Amino acid sequence: MRSEKDELLRSYDESQSTLIGPKELIIAFLVLAIALLILMPKIYLANEIYFTSRKINKLLDEYEILKEENRILKQRLEQERFKTQVLDTIF
């Protein structure tokens, strides 16, 4: 009875004390390296697309603002032309 318990405890201790061998460690690093090689270009491209779209949106906003300013300036110019034409006809 005693020897069965000792044998079971010994086999349990042996199974618990096994460490990761160098082969498993190399495989784990290879899997990690392959995952990084696959994911890094995707992350890089996603970031580039995001920042480029931010720049495009900023430029589009500035373009819309400049178009509105141009419209206002054309309107003022037309008003000034009208004033000068009216004033020229009066005097």
Image (cartoon, rainbow, N blue to C red):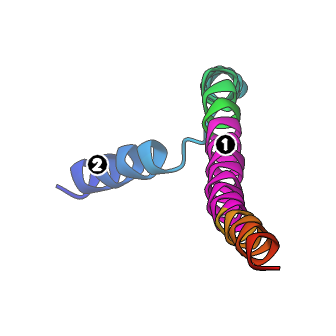
Q: Quadrant of residue 21?
A: top right
Residue nearer the viewer, 89 or 8: 89
Residue nearer the viewer, 21 or 41: 41
Q: Which residues are magenta?
A: 47-74
Query: How many numbered discs sit on the rendered protein?
Result: 2
Q: Which residue is mark 2?
A: 8
Residue pictured at 77% horizontal, 78% vertical: 87
Residue pictured at 80% horizontal, 71% vertical: 84
| Mark closest to the chain's N terminus, 2 or 1 | 2
What is the x, y in percent for residue 30? 68, 21
As for residue 91 lying within the magenta part, the answer is: no
The answer to whether 39 appears left or right of 29 in the picture is left
What is the x, y in percent for residue 16? 45, 50
Residue that sits furthest to the left in the current view: 1
The answer to whether 62 appears left or right of 9 in the picture is right
As for residue 68 lying within the magenta part, the answer is: yes
Circle 2 residues within 10 Å: few <14, some 14–19, many ≥20: few
Q: Quadrant of residue 50?
A: top right
Q: Which residue is mark 1?
A: 47
Label 2 SS: helix
What is the x, y in percent for residue 62? 70, 58
Q: CA distance from mark 2 to mark 1?
A: 56 Å
Question: Residue type at mark 2?
Answer: Leu
Question: Residue type at mark 1?
Answer: Asn
Using the image, determine if residue 7 lies above or below residue 22.
below
